[in-house]
C-alpha cells in the first residue's frame, strides 16, 4: 500500500509541470487570432457584411432624396398624317397623303404639382434616409453587444476549462497508476471505481464546456467575419476589476437612453414619417394641374393654329379618402409603439442597474486571497497525501471542491461584466 501511495504522489508531483506545458494545448489550432476588445471592435466595423449592407442601404435612401427633388419632365407629343391617302373633291386640298399636303400637330405639356407635394416628398425621403442611418446604428449596437458578450464569455469559460484540464490530467495520472497496479491487491476496487467514475464525469463536463466555448467562438467569428481561426481573447483585467456601478444614477441613465438608444429613435422617426405621410396624403387629394401649349398646322378652322390651356382631374369620386384615413391610423400605431418602447427602455435600464449592483455586491464579497489560498492548500494537500495523513478520496474531494469554487468565481465574474454590458446596450451609449 505504501508503494502505491508513493507511486501516486510521484504522478501528482509532476502534475504542475505537465499542466504548465499543456494548459494552452487543449485549444491550440494551426491558425490563431489574438484580439483585445478594441481590435475586435475595429475588425467588426471593417469586415461585418451586415454592417456593410446597412451602409449600402443608407446610400440607397440618400439617393432617393435626389430623386424627390427632381421636377417632373415636360411632355412633348407630335403627330403627322394622313397615313392613308385622302381624296376629297370638296376639300381645299383634294389630294393629300403622308408626304404631300399632310397635317402636323404638336403639343407641349408640363405637370405642375400643387399643395406642396414636392416638398412633402422631399421631407419623407430625408426622413427615410435618417431612418436608414438609425437602423445602421442599431444594427451596430446589437452586433457590438453580441461581440462584447461573446468576448467575455469565451474568456471566463476558458478560465473554467483550465481547471477541468488540470483535474482531468491529475485523475488520468491516478487511473494510469491504478491500471499498472491492477491485480496486485494494493488498491481497493471500490476506490478504483470511484476515481474512474469521477474522471468520466469530469471528461463529460469538460466536453460540454468545450462545445459551449466552440459555439460562442463560432458566433464571434461570424460577427468578425473570420474563418476557421481559434480566437484568443485578451481582456483588460485591470479595467474589468475597476468597474463599479456606484457612480450611476437611474434618471441620468434613462435620459441617456432617450437621447441615444437607436431603437427608440427609430420608433420616433417612424412616427415622424407617418405624420409626414399623412400630410402628403391630404395634399394628394388636391389635383395637380397640367399646362399645355399646342400647335395645329391645318386641322383647325385656320392654318397654323396655336393654343394654350390646362388640364386637371375633377375630384368628384376619388379624393384619396382611404389613404388619408390609413395614414392617420398609422400615426396612432407609431405613437403607441413609441410609448411602448419608452416603457421597455425604462424597465430594462432599471433591471440592468439592479443586476449590476447585485453582481458587484457579490463580487466584492470574494476574498482577493481566495485563489492564492487554494493554490497553497493544493500543495499542502499533496504533502499530507504523501505522508498518508489523508486518504485518496479526501484528496479527490479537495480537487472537486477546488473546481466548484473556481467555476463559481468565473461565473460571478462573467455575470458582473455582463451586467455592465447590458447597461451599455440598454442605454445605447458607452457607459463603460
Image (spheres, rainbow, N blue to C red):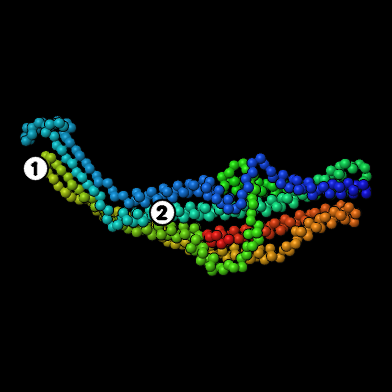
- The local secondary structure at tag 2 comes to helix
Residue at coordinates 93% horizontally, 45% vertically from top-left?
A: 185
The residue indicated by pointer 1 is 302
Against 256, residue 92 (above or below) is above
Identify the disc placed on residue 128.
2
Q: Is residue 46 left or right of residue 192?
A: left
Of discs 2 and 1, which sits in the foreground?
2
Front residue of this view, candidates 98 and 404: 404
Residue 94 seen from this side: yes
Q: Is residue 422 above or below residue 300?
A: below
**Residue 114 picture location, percent across and down:** 27, 55
Counting from the top left corner in percent of width and height, residue 111 is at 25, 50
Decide if residue 161 is on the left or right side of residue 105: right
- Give the side of residue 386 with respect to residue 323, left or right: right
Which residue is rendered at x = 17% and y = 36% of the image? 80
x and y percentages locating residue 227 in the rendered image: 59, 42
Q: Position of residue 166 (x, y in %)?
A: 77, 49
Q: Is residue 199 visible?
A: no
Q: Secondary structure at mark 1?
A: loop
Q: Is residue 340 left or right of residue 29?
A: left
**Quadrant of the rendering where the C terminus is positioned:** bottom right
Q: CA distance from mark 2 to mark 1?
A: 54 Å
Amino acid at each position: 500500500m505504501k508503494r502505491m501511495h508513493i507511486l501516486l504522489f510521484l504522478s501528482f508531483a509532476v502534475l504542475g509541470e505537465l499542466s504548465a506545458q499543456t494548459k494552452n494545448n487543449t485549444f491550440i489550432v494551426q491558425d490563431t487570432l489574438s484580439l483585445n476588445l478594441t481590435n475586435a471592435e475595429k475588425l467588426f466595423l471593417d469586415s461585418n457584411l451586415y454592417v456593410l449592407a446597412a451602409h449600402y442601404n443608407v446610400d440607397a435612401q440618400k439617393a432617393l432624396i435626389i430623386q424627390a427633388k427632381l421636377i417632373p419632365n415636360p411632355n412633348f407629343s407630335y403627330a403627322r398624317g394622313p397615313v392613308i391617302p385622302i381624296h376629297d373633291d370638296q376639300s381645299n386640298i383634294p389630294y393629300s397623303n403622308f408626304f404631300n399636303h399632310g397635317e402636323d400637330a404638336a403639343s407641349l405639356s408640363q405637370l405642375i404639382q400643387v399643395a406642396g407635394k414636392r416638398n412633402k416628398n422631399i421631407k419623407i425621403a430625408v426622413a427615410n434616409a435618417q431612418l436608414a442611418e438609425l437602423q445602421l446604428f442599431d444594427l451596430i449596437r446589437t452586433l457590438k453587444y453580441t461581440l462584447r458578450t461573446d468576448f467575455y464569455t469565451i474568456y471566463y469559460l476558458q478560465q473554467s476549462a483550465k481547471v477541468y484540464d488540470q483535474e482531468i490530467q491529475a485523475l488520468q495520472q491516478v487511473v494510469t497508476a491504478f491500471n499498472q497496479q491492477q491485480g496486485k491487491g494494493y488498491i481497493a476496487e471500490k476506490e478504483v471505481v470511484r476515481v474512474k467514475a469521477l474522471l468520466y464525469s469530469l471528461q463529460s463536463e469538460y466536453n460540454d464546456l468545450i462545445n459551449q466555448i466552440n459555439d460562442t467562438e463560432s458566433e464571434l467569428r461570424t460577427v468578425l467575419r473570420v474563418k476557421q481561426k481559434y480566437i484568443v481573447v485578451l481582456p483588460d483585467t485591470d479595467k474589468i476589476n475597476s468597474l463599479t456601478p456606484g457612480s450611476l444614477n437611474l434618471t441620468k441613465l434613462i435620459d441617456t437612453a432617450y437621447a441615444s438608444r437607436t431603437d427608440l429613435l427609430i420608433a420616433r422617426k417612424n412616427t415622424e414619417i407617418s405624420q409626414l405621410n399623412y400630410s402628403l396624403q391630404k395634399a394628394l387629394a388636391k389635383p395637380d394641374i397640367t399646362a399645355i401649349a399646342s400647335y395645329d398646322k391645318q386641322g383647325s378652322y385656320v392654318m397654323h393654329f396655336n393654343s394654350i390651356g390646362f388640364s386637371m382631374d375633377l375630384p368628384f369620386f376619388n379624393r384619396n379618402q382611404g389613404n388619408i384615413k390609413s395614414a392617420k391610423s398609422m400615426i396612432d400605431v407609431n405613437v403607441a409603439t413609441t410609448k411602448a418602447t419608452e416603457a421597455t427602455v425604462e424597465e430594462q435600464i432599471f433591471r440592468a442597474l439592479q443586476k449590476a449592483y447585485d453582481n458587484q455586491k457579490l463580487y466584492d464579497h470574494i476574498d482577493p486571497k481566495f485563489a492564492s489560498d487554494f493554490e497553497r492548500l493544493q500543495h499542502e494537500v499533496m504533502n499530507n497525501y504523501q505522508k498518508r495523513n489523508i486518504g485518496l478520496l479526501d484528496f479527490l474531494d479537495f480537487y472537486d471542491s477546488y473546481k466548484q469554487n473556481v467555476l463559481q468565481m468565473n461565473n460571478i465574474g462573467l455575470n458582473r461584466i455582463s451586467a455592465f454590458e447590458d447597461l451599455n446596450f440598454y442605454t445605447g451609449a458607452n457607459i463603460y
